[in-house]
Amino acid sequence: MQTALGPVFNTVSPQAGAIANLFGIVLVICGVIFAIVTSAIAYNLLRFRAKADAPEPRQIFGNRRLEILWTATPAAILALLLFLTSRVMGRVDPPLDAKADIIVTGHQWWWEARYVASGVHAANEIHIPAGKRWLVDLEAADVIHDLWSPQLGRKMDAVPGRTNRVWLEADIPGTYIGFCDEFCGAQHAWMQFRVIAQPPAEFEAWAQQQTQPAIATAATAAGRKAFQDLLCVNCHAVGGIGTNATAGPDLTHVAGRETLGGGVLANSPANLALWLKNPQAIKPACLMPNFNLTDGQARDLAAFLEATP
Ligand code: CUA
């Protein structure tokens, strides 16, 4: 449904479309009721305004027909909304017994995406094949977060200690911005993500590339060594380095991502070096401390990390 009313109506998945349609119907029904009530109030205020010398008007104590009408009409409207809502729920609710395609975990303040079949670990950018409905298990590592990409619909909480499920689907290839939609601390605003829907062949190529280890060349050797010596390995995994740490995002293919730090910076070697120099200056209170790196160390690390798309 293409409209000028913003992403909530400019939907690209059947789930989001069903929700947007329901919202539109409710909005129209409520708009009509609002118009009837306000115009009746305005009419009666003007038409029956008391005049200075007018006598007491006739008093009315009950009207059975009117009372039946104003009880039955709202009941009928609510029954209709219940029917429409349960139909939409049937369309957007995922099954509870099927196996998930992706496990998405909310962290303060980034998103982790683990692909069940391929074992790929992505961060803040969830690639999916366009036109295919994928089942997402949603979890939280620390506090409550909420996954919402307005054009793809269904907002869903990520709650520590439980798994919520949601369909993720985009019928048109493209990049769809998403947000954390539950206040989760200082950097809640910089917990953005992107859903990147690709033609199936392109998606397969991406998934294949994501399983490859980090490129090792003479140009990346100093950064590769610094990554181990400076203990980056305690929190971050990089394929080929021999670490499976999951406290921070997997950085093997960070070069292929559009942004850094949950959307706070555009991804470039210069910005990554800036981030490494002092993450607290860019995203205060984020879990990555300031390691007081030298310019050279930050540059070497950035060169290593930005070498593998
Ligand atoms: Cu995570 Cu707000």
Image: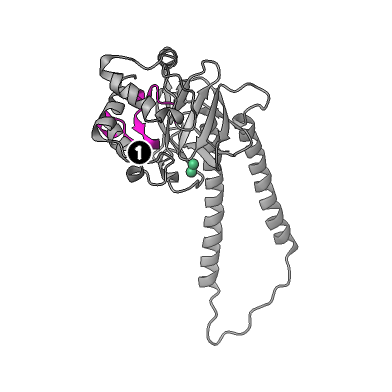
Residue in the picture at 65% in, 22% down: 98
Could you say whether the residue bearing mark 1 is in a helix, strand or loop? Answer: loop
Question: What is the total number of numbered labels drawn onto the structure image?
Answer: 1
The stretch in magenta equals 249-271
Relative to residue 146, is residue 304 depicted above or below? above
Residue at left 73%, top 72%? 61
Q: Which residue is mark 1?
A: 291
Answer above or below: position of 89 versus 129: below
Q: Residue furthest front?
A: 229
Q: Could you tell whether 146 is left or right of 290 in the image?
A: right
Residue 138 counted in the magenta span:
no
Q: Amino acid at mark 1?
A: Phe
- Estimate the x, y position of residue 85 in percent, counting from the top left: 63, 39
**Image quadrant occupied by the C terminus:** top left
Residue placed furthest toward the bottom? 53
Position of residue 192 measured from the top left corner of the image (x, y, whole percent): 42, 37
Q: Residue furthest right?
A: 64
Please identify the quadrant where the N terminus is shown: top left
In percent of the image, x 70 and y 73: which residue is there?
60
Left or right of 286? Residue 88 is right
Q: Position of residue 216 (x, y in %)?
A: 33, 15
Residue 266 falls inside the magenta stretch: yes
